[in-house]
Amino acid sequence: MAFGREEIDEEDDALEFPPIDDGAEMHRPLEPADPEPADPEPAGPAHLLNEYQAEAAGHVDGPLLVFAGAGSGKTRVITYRIANLVAVHRIPPYRILAVTFTNKAAGEMRHRLDDLIGPELARDLWVGTFHAICARLLRRHHDAAGLPRAFVIYDDGDQRAVMSRVVKELNIDDKRFPPRQLLGAIHKHKQEAQAPEDLPRANFYDDLVVRAYEAYERHFKAAGALDFDDLMLRVLRLAEDPDSTAGTDLRRRFGHVLVDEFQDVNQVQYRLVRALSREHGNLCVVGDDDQSIYKWRGADVRIVRGFRKDNPNARVVKLEQNYRSTENVVAAALGVIAPSRDREPKELWTSNEKGAPIEVVATASERDEAAFVAGRVRDLLSQDVSPGEIAVFYRVHAQSRVLEEVMRAERVPYVVYGGHRFFERAEIKDLLSYLRVLVNPLSDVDLARIVNVPSRKIGGSTVDKLLAFASGRGTSAYEAIVPLCQSSELATAPKKALARFYTLMEELRSDLTGLLPPSPRALADRVLDATGYRDWLKADGSAEAEARLQNVEELVGSIAEYEIELEAAGEVPTVEGYLERITLATAGDDAGDAPRVCLMTVHAAKGLEFRHVFITGMEEDLFPFRSQDRERDDDDEERRLAYVAITRARVGLVVTHAQRRMIFGTTRYGIPSRFLQDVPRDVIESMATSLYGSVGGGGGGGSGGGSGMSSGKFGDRSGWGSQVQAPRAPAPPLPTSGVRSPMPLFAVPLPMHPPKAPAPQRERERQPGERFVERDVDASQLSGEVATIGSVAPGTRVAHGSFGIGVVRALDGGSDPTATVRFTGWGDKRIKLRFLQLA
DNA sequence: TGCGCTCTACGTGCG
DNA sequence: GTAGAGCGCA
């Protein structure tokens, strides 16, 4: 262990961290959110922590509330605090719990802690999302929680499926009370730790919700399943139980609890961290009420604001110096947030340079806007700004399509965060459902999903009968198959079909238990073959089916990776383990990817930072967003959202709005957002594209915001609006074709037909982004190691959807050739050639 | 039972 | 614009 330091008096304000010797990493710029090379550092502090950061990191006893303004070094404070606890106060790492909301944040924290205290110590820390931590604790205490060991976690889609069943069962009119709405109501109660019996049934609707809630819970219990709220609720119930041993264990387990993004916690999460820290009161929470943008998801700003009341002895530290952004950006952000009511009094400030003005650009339409943004992005790329340093934000996902189209046309490498996720794709959910049923046959939702996929002539009515029969007997649907087939309630054909399905599943189940050593990958493979799923996709022949097939194969690949990883760690890979990992893991961890321009919603941008930020759609009714039938109370939240968007920018900030916009299938005419009026005039430079004002009404540019038409700067009428030619930069490697997955780990873009001809491969120039799918290449006839396949040889640079850019080290021929590729940050991976592209 | 057409509703999305 | 649900027909 590398602590070569004398103990530091914990009352010492000018604490310098870390107390370890190898300080090389300590001089990294503050908040390096991107893996990109740091640019001219926004005048960071000469010392490691400023006075306030040091106070927050140094006082380790009792409750602590840190208001951390945007860009003020929040993550740094948390990690240094943990380092301080471990290295100076000698708290065993396993006694420290640090909770985040996203995997990305947890990963980032872990990464920095590796650097600070070394991987051996960092490994034992409890760092993770609320959900991951709770799942882990529940696995330990599943008995006390009354759960089967192999409980499954139902995602949104599964939850909706359960709710739809409930609605059917209770004969609820799904027009008046859509499952979605009921589910929302139930989640709301769960997030406030209210069980059905705690709820009023005063009127018809309340009663309906309670009945739906009860039925929903019944289904989950029967299926041995939990939803995401349950994970935390179950742990909370244990932790608040004064008598159980599990409760005692939970309350004593941790000596220090830290919570990141505290403004986002809901009641359950707050009670949970309080319970876990009750015995010692060492609860440190870090947040920013100005960045509370998840009220609609159950976050309760009152918690951060009321923390002092709940903890009268809490120390409060405010971090108000922004190290991230230019003075102009900070000024713009302050202007937007200032009118917000009920803020904790604080003032963000910066000593960074003034920087360029905020550009407010009026555009004619959403296409004009997109073209303008793409043009400016090309400019930046031609100035050698890395694409990964550029982000384009929008308020709603529907805005992304046009941006994508134009980016693609302009050959700008981009990635869209959000949208259709890999694990929400039908084919992926199908395979996972097979695995889940095999592990846990109680899971009716999964059974219903796959019982007729591929088609086995077991239609909806048969499934309904099966489910009804099962609930009549109080068993799971799977268990009900045999008795149903023995009964007289089914016609012969469906009976036969069901029986065949049952036999198939039983065979697979015996594979599950029979495989020694157990191999999740082998099982998944067996499932694909035995169920006919693979053949079904192959037989389809459409480009879409081909992409689905590739996705499925990628999933198998990911299972294989999991297996390898666990075996390397000396652990036993299990299907359950894999399922849990992927249910709790989602977006964002594409650190290894080639840099691309990030397209994302403002919500998705929280916690990130970029050198250049474009905020699009700054129009009334879009941002702030208005829907017809909502309470108007979200006004401040929209404002905070705008604040979050602005404060992501380090150096450049461009805000655009359009006169008219085609969205949700209709054209809307908009005026510039009220938020633009709140930005101080002297930090803005207003301009308009050449098309602005040319079509339709509102010629003068509506009110305020961006009315100055400096069209001289935008004379180029080729294409839409303004394009500045990017002179030399050839389009950078473009491994994207609009993969919408935030986890492009396995996603395969739809149709992409490879050249079929076995052209003289060595001669042919390949385009960046082209895929290798040739099967008929000479070397591919051979099995075993070969020197080249097509234009690929050891040393060739290739790109992979999840691992980014790598270098080929070895090649294997055969009908489906593979390459061993070394990826930065991932090490060597064996990958089928058809999943690689030239970089 | 399954396919294909029509209608509709549509925020933001962590895990 | 588009995905998912519902309905009618083969």
Image: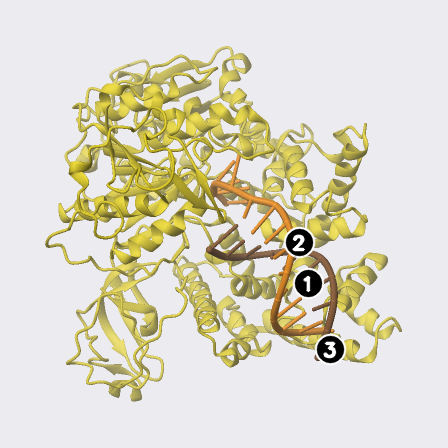
Chain colours: A yellow, B orange, C brown
- Residue type beneath disc 2: Ala
Residue A9 appears in which quarter of the rendering? top left
Whether residue A203 is visible to the viewer of this picture, yes or no, is yes
Residue drawn 55% across and 33% down? A296
Where disc 1 sits, the SS reads helix
> Which residue in the protein does label 3 denote?
A497
> Which residue in the protein does label 1 denote?
A448
The answer to whether A92 is drawn above or below residue A11 in the figure is below
| Crowd tier of the residue under label 3, counting other residues whose Cα lies within 10 Å: few below 14, some 14–19, many 20 or above | some
- Residue type beneath disc 3: Ala
- The answer to the question of whether label 1 and label 2 lie on touching residues, with beta carbons closer than 8 A, is yes
Q: Left or right of A219: which side holds A559?
A: left
Where disc 3 sits, the SS reads helix
Q: Earlier in the sequence, mark 2 or mark 3?
A: 2
Q: Furthest residue to the right?
A: A488
Give the spatial CA distance, label 2 vs label 3.
Answer: 23 Å
| Crowd tier of the residue under label 2, counting other residues whose Cα lies within 10 Å: few below 14, some 14–19, many 20 or above | some
Which of the pair A384/A25 is nearer the observer?
Answer: A384
Residue drawn 54% across and 35% down? A627
- The answer to the question of whether label 2 and label 3 lie on touching residues, with beta carbons closer than 8 A, is no
Where disc 2 sits, the SS reads helix
Q: Left or right of A426: which side holds A687?
A: left
Residue drawn 36% across and 16% down? A318
Dot label at residue A161: 2
Residue A760 placed where, x, y %? 19, 85
Q: Left or right of A536: which side holds A71?
A: left
Give the spatial CA distance, label 3 vs label 1.
Answer: 14 Å
Chain letter for mark 3, please: A
Give the spatial CA distance, label 1 vs label 2.
Answer: 9 Å
Residue A679 placed where, x, y %? 31, 22
